[in-house]
Each structure stands twice: as structure tokens, then as C-alpha cells.
Image: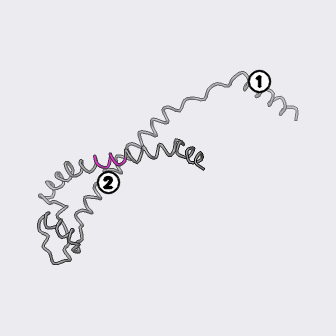
């Protein structure tokens, strides 16, 4: 059983998946920084300075006028609908989806470029093909 597990782990697909998960986590941090540090300030500027993270529907008793109050209300388990965070998460998703689209498009183009013309048949393959054709002609 241990040897089967070693074979399973040593398969290329499992290793590729592990690498993809690690790269995906690092990519997620980059996208979060890109979104929070570049995209959202521009969106805020275009929308008149709106900070989406501070957009909540307060269903509790605690005030939630500042980011600190929102954090305190969240920590106190006050009922809040964080629709601004949802908007941020949708923007992050769209960025990741777009980058993945571009990456997939590039990989498909790269793979097509790497696909070489089939190698010419060897002498043995040519001889076998001739034998096959002769046998077909006799039938």
C-alpha cells in the first residue's frame, strides 16, 4: 500500500496540481494587492470617492460608520450585510478570470506552435505499409 501511495504521489498530475495550488495562492495575493491598491482607488475616484469596503447594511444595534466600527461589529457578531465586500470580491474574480483567460489562450497558442509535423515514416514503416497494400490488393 505504501508503494502504491508513492507511485500516486510521484505521478506528474499530482505534482502539477500541487504546484498549481501553490502558484494560485501566490497569484491570489498579487491579485488582492492589485485590486486593493490600484483598481479600487481608480474605481473610487470614478465613483466620487466611494470606498466599497465601507458599504454595509447594518441589521444590528452597533454603529458602522467607519471601517473600525465595521470591524468591531463583525468581531462582535453583529448582523451585517457586507455588499461592498461582495463588489470587491466580484472585481477580484473578474480580474483573475481575465488573467486565466489570457493565460489559457497563450498556452493553447504555445502548444499549437510546439506541435510539429509528424515525422516521416521510417524504412520499416514504409515496408510494412507496402506489405499491407499488397495484401489488400490480393483480397
Question: Which mark is drawn over residue 94?
Answer: 2
Residue 44 image-quadrant placement: bottom left
Question: Which mark is drawn over residue 119?
Answer: none
Residue assigned mark 1: 127
Residue at the far front: name it: 2
Residue under the point 28% across and 58% down: 89
Q: Is residue 15 left or right of residue 39?
A: right
Residue under the point 19% across and 69% down: 56
Q: How many tags in the picture? A: 2
Instruction: Indicate the quadrant containing the C terminus: top left, top right, bottom left or bottom right.
Output: top right
| Inter-mark Cα distance, 1 to 2 | 57 Å
- In the picture shown, does residue 134 fall above or below 24? above
Q: Is residue 12 left or right of residue 89?
A: right
Q: Is residue 26 magenta?
A: yes
The percent position of residue 101, horizontal first and vertical second, equals 39, 47
Residue under the point 18% across and 70% down: 73
Q: Is residue 31 magenta?
A: no
The percent position of residue 88, horizontal first and vertical second, equals 25, 58
Residue under the point 23% across and 48% down: 33
- The residues colored magenta run 24-30
Q: Is residue 15 left or right of residue 126?
A: left
Dominant SS of magenta comes to: helix
User: 120 or 70, which is in the foreground?
Assistant: 70
Amino acid at each position: 500500500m505504501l508503494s502504491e501511495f508513492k507511485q500516486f504521489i510521484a505521478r506528474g498530475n499530482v505534482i502539477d496540481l500541487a504546484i498549481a495550488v501553490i502558484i494560485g495562492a501566490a497569484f491570489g495575493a498579487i491579485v488582492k494587492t492589485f485590486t486593493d491598491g490600484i483598481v479600487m482607488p481608480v474605481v473610487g475616484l470614478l465613483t466620487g470617492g466611494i470606498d466599497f469596503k465601507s458599504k454595509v447594511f447594518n441589521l444590528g444595534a452597533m454603529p458602522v460608520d467607519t471601517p473600525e466600527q465595521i470591524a468591531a461589529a463583525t468581531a462582535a457578531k453583529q448582523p451585517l450585510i457586507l455588499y461592498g465586500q461582495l463588489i470587491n470580491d466580484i472585481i477580484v474574480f473578474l480580474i483573475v478570470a481575465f488573467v486565466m483567460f489570457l493565460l489559457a489562450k497563450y498556452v493553447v497558442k504555445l502548444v499549437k506552435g510546439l506541435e510539429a509535423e509528424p515525422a516521416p515514416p521510417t524504412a520499416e514503416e514504409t515496408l510494412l505499409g507496402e506489405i499491407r497494400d499488397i495484401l489488400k490488393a490480393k483480397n
